[in-house]
Amino acid sequence: MRQLDLLVAAPSDPAGFAGWGDVAFAQSLQRAFRSFGVATRLLFRDTYTTAPAPPPETALLVLRGKFRPLPAWLEQAPYQSLLLWQISWPLDVSRQELAAYDHLFVASAQDRQRLAYLSGRPTTVLLQATDFQQLGPPQAPCRGLLFVGNTRGVARPLVLAFARSGLPLTVIGAGWEVYGIRAERSSISNHELPDLYARSLAVLNDHHTAMRDFGYLNNRVFDVLACGVPVITDGAPGCPGELSPAVLVHGPKDDPQATLAAVHRCRDRVGLLQQLSRHVAGHHRFEHRAGEILQCCAGILNTGTSPGRG
């Protein structure tokens, strides 16, 4: 494979990229593939059907979130192999859609068997990942709790619980004024996040209901741990056990003060956060995921088959 095209749910206007997490995800994955000598190209939901044809020996990887490519386009696309990485919205896919691919990757060990059954295709667990890292010795937190994200037009119970608790919380994102929360900023670039995380006491994280119920751990967990900071999350679906000491689950009936006390206990464990940061760097970076995808592509080529297209 000489090139990999990555299809994302975001539209192609760069002015809107900051509002699409899958763009940052895909760009991180691009850098990882380039470290293996594989050229990459991003395709977007509004322009992918008119993009120039790929060169020979190109594979397609669909980062499947909220957007499904047109079946007719997928059937005729001149790719060496068709790959899908299910990273979120697991209930939006159908048997017919999944069967169009040569291989599926799924960011949930819990959901792998279901997607394999639906598709009839080889299916591999491939968790989400990070390219954040801890720079230098750990910093003493100079901020309180932090949440980065928009309201998405719905109440986000974890954020509301901590905002209403009176604990020091910084929110960055749009739409929060509806809930009486004053955001520090409405948006932030991805490259600013590692330093912001590193200076925070802990970072709040939540999941779409289907992601949580079907075992999809989002990449914010890996991002925050990579920076040497604890995560407060509404659930830890499929979280690798070795990371769990700094992944603090806060349920609907839990007391924010008690969870904050757990954060301080976590930070009091000398060396724990550094150890977990090193573990993430050694096992959960995008380079690791890219390497697994390349191994899979080599296996598909060695068999000489493309089951997704008959």
Image (cartoon, grey):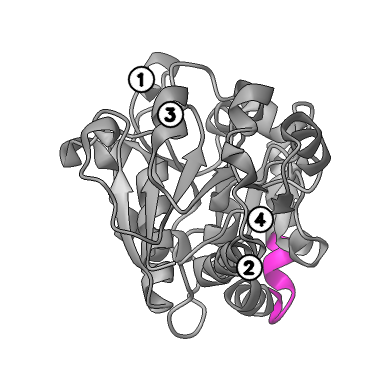
Looking at numbered disc 3 in the image, what kind of residue is underneath it? Pro
The residue indicated by pointer 2 is 302
Residue at 54% x, 51% y: name it: 220
Q: Nearer the viewer, residue 232 or 60?
A: 60
Foreground disc of the pair 1, 3:
3
CA separation in Å, label 4 and label 2:
21 Å
Quadrant housing the C terminus: top right
CA separation in Å, label 3 and label 2:
27 Å
Foreground disc of the pair 3, 4:
3
Q: First in sequence: mark 1 or mark 3?
A: 3
Q: Which contiguous range is marked in magenta?
A: 264-272
Residue 177: mark: 1
CA neighbours of label 3 inside 10 A, class few (<14), some (14 to 19), many (20+): some
The residue indicated by pointer 3 is 69
Residue 126: mark: 4
Q: Is residue 303 above or below residue 104?
A: below
Q: Nearer the viewer, residue 109 or 241?
A: 109
CA separation in Å, label 3 and label 4:
21 Å
Q: First in sequence: mark 4 or mark 2?
A: 4
CA neighbours of label 1 inside 10 A, class few (<14), some (14 to 19), many (20+): few
247 with respect to 295 (left or right): right
CA separation in Å, label 1 and label 3:
35 Å
CA neighbours of label 4 inside 10 A, class few (<14), some (14 to 19), many (20+): many
Q: Within the magenta stretch, is there residue 240? A: no
Looking at numbered disc 2 in the image, what kind of residue is underneath it? Asn
- Percent position of residue 135, x then y: 43, 80
Residue at 51% x, 71% y: name it: 287
